[in-house]
Amino acid sequence: MKQIIGLFFILITLSTYSQERGNEKKETILKAPKVDIRVELLSIVFRLAGSHEYSQNLFPKYVESIENHFEEFKSHDLIEYVKDELLEDGIGFSAVMSMAIHITDPPNLAPLLNPFPYKSLEEPWEKESAIKFIKLLNEFYIETDCETFFNKNKALYTTASNRFKKVYQNLDVAWYQNFYGAKPKGAFSIINGLGNGGANYGPKIFSQNGNEVIYAIMGTWSVDSLSMPTYEIEEYFPTLLHEFNHSFVNHLVEKYHAELQESGTIIFEKVKDEMNKQAYGNWKTMYDEALVRASVIKYMKDHNYDKATIKNELNEQLSSSFLWTDELVKELERYDNNRDKYPSLESFMPEIVKFFNLTAAKIKT
C-alpha cells in the first residue's frame, strides 16, 4: 500500500501539485522540516528512564551515540523522577512531546507560556509535576553536558532535515483548512525526531493571543547503507498526512467528551485488546484515531488516489479494529457535500455523535 502511495505521488502529484500552489504561499503556513533540540532532549531522557516507546533502536548509529554520552547518567535525579513518578502517572507517548514544545530552547529551559502549565499541554501533566520536571531537566542539561552532545550531532541534524524535504513538499496544507473549515492562527511545523524510532506525534501549542503552531513530530525508522536516515515518500508521507489531522480533530472530540462518552465506552470495551496493542488505552484516544484515519481516506479521495490505494488504506483500518471506518468516511463525505449547512467539522460534530451512538448499538454484530 505504501509503495503504491509513493509511486502515485511521484508520477502525478509532483508534476501538477506545485503548479497549483506556489512555494511562497506554502512557506507562509508550513515551515520547513527541522530537528528540534527540545524533542531530542526529552526523547533521550525518557529513553534513559526505560520508557518503551522511546527505547526503539531503529536508528542504531544515533542510539549508540546517545548511549555513549549518557549511559553514566542513568541514575541522575531527573531519570529517577521520571521512572518513579512520571511513568507511574501515565506520562509517556504524546505527553512527552507535548512538554517538549511547551518549553523554551536550551540551555535555559523554562515554560514557554504563562500561566503554566498552559491549557494546550497534554494530560496527565499537572502543575506540580511539570514544574519539578523542568527544574530537574535544567540540572540534567548542565550536569550531563548536553550542549556538547547536540553540537557534535549538528551536521547529522541538518542532513536528516534536508533529506525529509522531499516528503514535506507533497503535503497539501490548504486541504486541512478547507476540509475542517478552520484556519490555523499560526503555522505548521514538521519536526524530525531522530530519537523517536517509529513513533510519531501531532501536538500543538497556542498562546494567549490565539496564535498556534501545529506540529507533526516524525520519527526516524529507516537508514541507508551508511547508517544515515533516509525518508522515502511511500514510507513517510502517509504518516505525515495522518499526524497533521490530529491537531484539527483531537480538540473536537474533547469538546464533545460528554456526548461521546457512552458510545465510546461501549465500543472500546469490544475492541479494547486490539486498541491496547496499538497504545490506544481509552475510548477518547480511539475516537481521535477513528476520525483521523477516516479523514486520511477523505484526503486520498479528494486528491484522486486510485481505487486500489484507497481500498488498501480502508482494509488496513479495518484490520486494526477500526471496524466502522467505511461508514465514518461516508459521514465525512456527507458533511463535505453539505458545507452550506455545516461550514466546519465542528458544526457537524452532533452528527458524528449520532453516528457513534448507532455504531455502539450494533457493535456486537
Image (cartoon, helix red, strand yellow):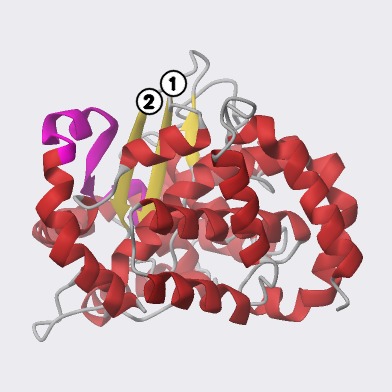
Q: Is residue 116 left or right of residue 241?
A: right
Looking at the image, which residue is at 67% across and 46% down? 123
Question: Which mark, by number, is residue 126?
Answer: none
Segment tinted magenta in the rendering: 20-40
Q: Nearer the viewer, residue 92 or 199?
A: 199
| 58 in the magenta segment | no
Residue at the spot of label 1: 211
Q: Nearer the viewer, residue 347 or 193?
A: 347
SS assignment at label 2: loop
Locate residue 330, reporting x and y percent.
62, 55
Q: Is residue 169 left or right of residue 194?
A: left
Q: Residue furthest bottom?
A: 225
Q: Name the amino acid type tagged 1.
A: Asn
Q: Nearer the viewer, residue 226 or 316?
A: 316
Q: Earlier in the sequence, mark 2 or mark 1?
A: 2
Q: Are marks 2 and 1 in contact (CB under 8 Å)?
A: yes
Quadrant housing residue 55: bottom left
Q: Name the amino acid type tagged 2.
A: Gly
Quadrant housing residue 44: bottom left
Residue at the spot of label 2: 186
Locate residue 106, reporting x and y percent.
31, 40
Q: Is residue 70 left or right of residue 350?
A: left
